[in-house]
Amino acid sequence: MSGNQEPLASDTELEDIELELFVRALKLRHGHDFSQYAPASLKRRVRQLSHTQHTGTITALTDRILHDPSLLPVVLEGLSVPVSEMFRDPDVFRALREQVFPVLASYPQINIWQAGCAYGQEVYSLAILLEEAGLYERTQIYATDFNEAALRHAQEGIYPAKEAQLWSRNYLEAGGSHTLADYYSARYELLKLDQRLRRNVIFANHNLVTDEVFCEAHLVLCRNVLIYFSDPLQDRTLALFRDSLVRGGFLCLGTRESLDFAPSALDFTPVDAALRIYRLGSRAAAKE
């Protein structure tokens, strides 16, 4: 090898280049920007897509996404993380029922934004607890996600019956006052949630990376989404939530997420820091 010849890129470096080109192609060709997603998590999902699509390399997957628009829904579904369960982290839902709902009850009309709603399990969990608290009739839930396939699934409200036992246990731990079976019918190894739970839910496409304020909300829930974002994108999203909330409105994040690192933290006071429930109102003002 000539002394002036540059060393060849390692396999890892080559894959990083492939990933960068994939992200650029997806943005330029289809307008979806994943450039500020956490790199390690994004790489894992793109690798999995390459495997399931039998492309062999990320470069080959990039070629397909450039020339085959029908692949876009599959790619977007693969890059999103629609994993949840009803009443996930029951202590959080109990805290919402006991600490947040009594404040929301003072409003004549309640708007709730569930951002990154995935397959809808947490949307319906919220609807059930609002129903039991006597608040659902005056509540509008806006459930958003950028994944159209996940939104369609959420609107159907149909899930595997094998989840029923776990979800029923979560429901009781969250402070449910009936039984979860009161809210669904089971058939052919599937359970279908009662349609009345969807009466005050609007499902809509919204991308936290590129879109602006979606609604004026008294409560914003975005749980286990920010962990997949880079720090700058997390702060942009938190600022979006701040600007969406009414004065004194509430923000609920995932239990693995935190406001502490972000400049936006100064705009919120903790309601329950361990459960990641906050209220809009500066920490400085709270100390006065």
Image (cartoon, rainbow, N blue to C red):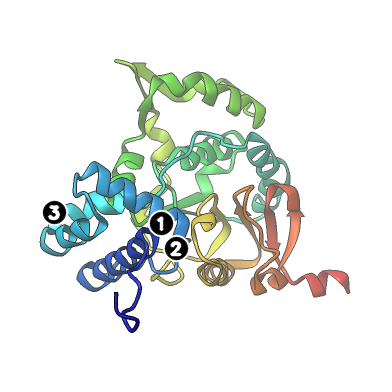
Residue at screen point 43% across, 46% down: 200
Identified by mark 2, the residue type is Tyr
Tag 2 residue: 37
- Of badges 1 and 3, the one in the foreground is 1
Residue 70: give its label: 3
**Dot 3 amino acid type:** Ser
Image marks 1 and 2: residues in contact by CB distance under 8 Å:
yes
Res. 111 visible in picture:
no
- Which of disc 2 and disc 1 is earlier in sequence? 2
Q: Which residue is mark 1?
A: 42
Quarter of the image with the C terminus in it: bottom right
Q: Using the image, determine if residue 128 lies above or below residue 117.
A: above
| Mark 2 residue crowding within 10 angstroms, few (<14) / some (14–19) / many (20+) | many
Q: Quadrant of residue 21?
A: bottom left
- Could you tell whether 82 is left or right of 59 in the image? right
- In the depicted structure, whether residue 58 falls above or below residue 214: above
Taking the spot 39% from the left edge, 69% from the top edge, the residue there is 35
Q: Is residue 184 visible?
A: yes
Secondary structure beneath dot 2 equals loop
The residue most toward the top is 188
Residue 169 numbered mark, or none:
none
Q: Residue furthest bottom?
A: 4
Contact between labelled residues 3 and 1, with CB atoms less than 8 Å apart: no
Q: Is residue 257 above or below residue 67?
A: above
Residue found at the very far right of the displayed protein: 288
Q: Amino acid at mark 1?
A: Leu
Q: Position of residue 231 (x, y in %)?
A: 56, 68
Q: Residue 24: which quarter of the image? A: bottom left
Ranked by sequence position, the earlier of labels 2 and 3 is 2
Q: CA distance from mark 2 to mark 3?
A: 23 Å
